[in-house]
Amino acid sequence: MGAIFFDLDGTLADTSEDIFLSLNKTLRKFHIKEIDFDVVLSYVGDGVRPLIQKTLRQLGAEEKEEEILKDFISEYRKNISRKTYIYKGNIELIFKLRRKNHKVILTTNKSHKLTVSLLSSLHIVQIFDGIVGGDSFDVKKPEAQLLEKIEQNLKISRPTLVIGDGINDLIFAEKTNSVFLFAKWGFLPQKVKKFIEENKISIEVIEAENPEDAVKKLESIGWL
């Protein structure tokens, strides 16, 4: 029995279009140039404020950060699951992990409130043993101290497995000496692949093309 840290954006679900549309709606309100989809995608993963900061820096409109942040959160909350969908096979993957008595913790840098709102809208809050947002503690991914906070609060046990599509997930796995399941079905697989090639990674990395492939790979190494 171990603990699985399951990422949200780009791993559990494709949230990209709702984030993109909400962000550009906010930018239009403030008469700021809209931003391209691929650029927004590259900014997802650190949380809402970094998303806004990177966007405004790119567009040269940093002076209105607080107003834009507030408006974006409002817009996104209203449209949080309009086009978002869970990747096929993820629900089965999570249930298989839980049937093996692993604790599955949804771990994201999205705020806890927005995360719960999204999971509630998708009717999947109850399938997780815990939900950790970017503001749940005073640290977030990829900091190793996050694992300590989760261990203290959710009583998890080792070994640990991180399932994610981003560099933050990989670094978090390495800092916590966890197995990393690279969700290649996510937002920017080529970015993570390049990071792996250019850096000395000391942990076990398992690549999965989709959630169904993840099941097979985890069965082959004894996690399922």
Image (spheres, grey):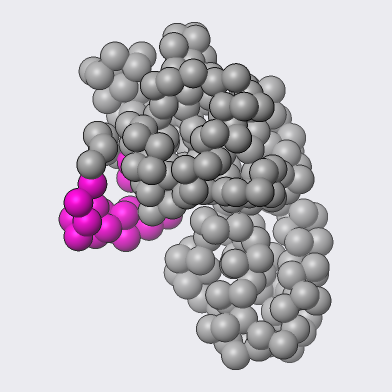
Residue nearest the viewer, comparing 85 with 133: 133
Measured from the top left, where is residue 125 in percent x and y?
A: 69, 29
Q: For this view, does 173 lie left or right of residue 153?
A: left
What's the residue at 23%, 42% (across, down)?
A: 202
What is the magenta range?
Answer: 181-201
Q: For this view, does 52 lie left or right of residue 167?
A: right
Quadrant of the image containing the C terminus: top left
Measured from the top left, where is residue 44 in percent x and y?
A: 53, 60
Q: For this view, does 197 lie left or right of residue 36?
A: left
What's the residue at 61%, 74% (across, down)?
A: 53
Q: For this view, does 118 lie left or right of residue 46?
A: right
Looking at the image, is 178 positioned above or below residue 118? above
Looking at the image, is 134 positioned above or below residue 42? above
What's the residue at 72%, 87% (across, down)?
A: 63
Residue nearest the viewer, comparing 145 with 40: 145
Total number of numbered discs in the rendering: 0
Quadrant of the image containing the N terminus: top left
- Residue 128 position by quadrant: top right
Q: Is residue 179 visible?
A: yes
Measured from the top left, where is residue 167 in percent x and y?
A: 38, 53
Residue 198 included in the magenta stretch of the image:
yes
Looking at the image, is 95 positioned above or below residue 118? above
Residue 138 included in the magenta stretch of the image:
no
- Residue 153 position by quadrant: top right
Measured from the top left, where is residue 181 in percent x and y?
A: 34, 35
What's the residue at 80%, 68% (across, down)?
A: 70
